[in-house]
Amino acid sequence: MSAEETPADHHVDQEMARADLTHVFGLRASAYLRVYDRQRARVAAGGGVLRLGWNWPAFGGWFVWFWYRKMWRLGALALLLPILGGLLFPGGDVLGYLVMASLASEVYVAAALRTCRAAEALGLAGERRAAYLAARGGVSWWGGVAGMVLLAGLAAADVMAHGDAILAVVVDAYDRLQAVGMIPPPE
């Protein structure tokens, strides 16, 4: 695949493109190859490359998923977007989570295609190409661990800053559930 080609280019050797992408994706390659196939179909039909989808790990793991998938800058953006959104307007933090989770898989495939084009531009072939793609793609367990540590620290800071409010919500929810009989009264 040359630097100018898109997933929809019919003259691209799709067998080679899929093999390259499999090296880049690493774990769960089949899930992302399906996203790639949908992108190809959309572009071939005259539509855009990106579409909103859903990625539960990116939603639940927030920026951690991006770091785990070696998308460091996007992970930083995913970390900052909900924070900035929450500061700018009510509900902006939730909107930030939703935007990142709805675009995660599509953006990941686009990043993988850029990695494949870089390998092509370097003139890599065979084992050297496969090693290059695997090294730049795949997953980073250390990125995932670092993200989880940071996420735990952010959660702890949030609890320390808003502990009384969180406790009040939990106690209120407990009282309401007890009032409707969903939780038996203490003996």
Image (spheres, helix red, strand yellow):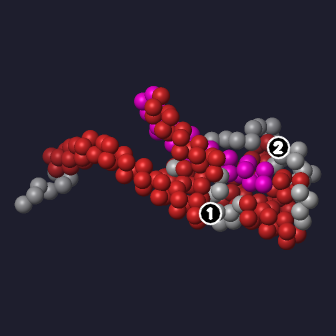
**In screen coordinates, is 132 left or right of 172?**
right
The quadrant in which residue 123 appears is: bottom right
State whether residue 26 is above or below residue 175: below
Find disc 2 in the rendering and name its residue: 44
Give the residues in magenta.
89-115
View extreme (left): residue: 187
21 or 184: nearer the viewer: 21
Q: Residues within 10 Å of mark 1 (few under 14, many from 20)?
A: some
Instruction: Give the number of the disc on residue 140.
Output: 1
**Residue 138 placed where, x, y %?**
68, 63
CB of mark 2 within 8 Å of CB of mark 1?
Answer: no
Query: Taking the image as drawn, is residue 98 in sight?
Result: no
Q: Amino acid at mark 2?
A: Ala
Select label 2 or label 1 by which is in front. Answer: 1
First along the sequence among labels 2 and 1: 2
How many tags in the picture?
A: 2
The residue located at (68%, 51%) in the rendering is 108
State whether residue 83 is above or below residue 58: above
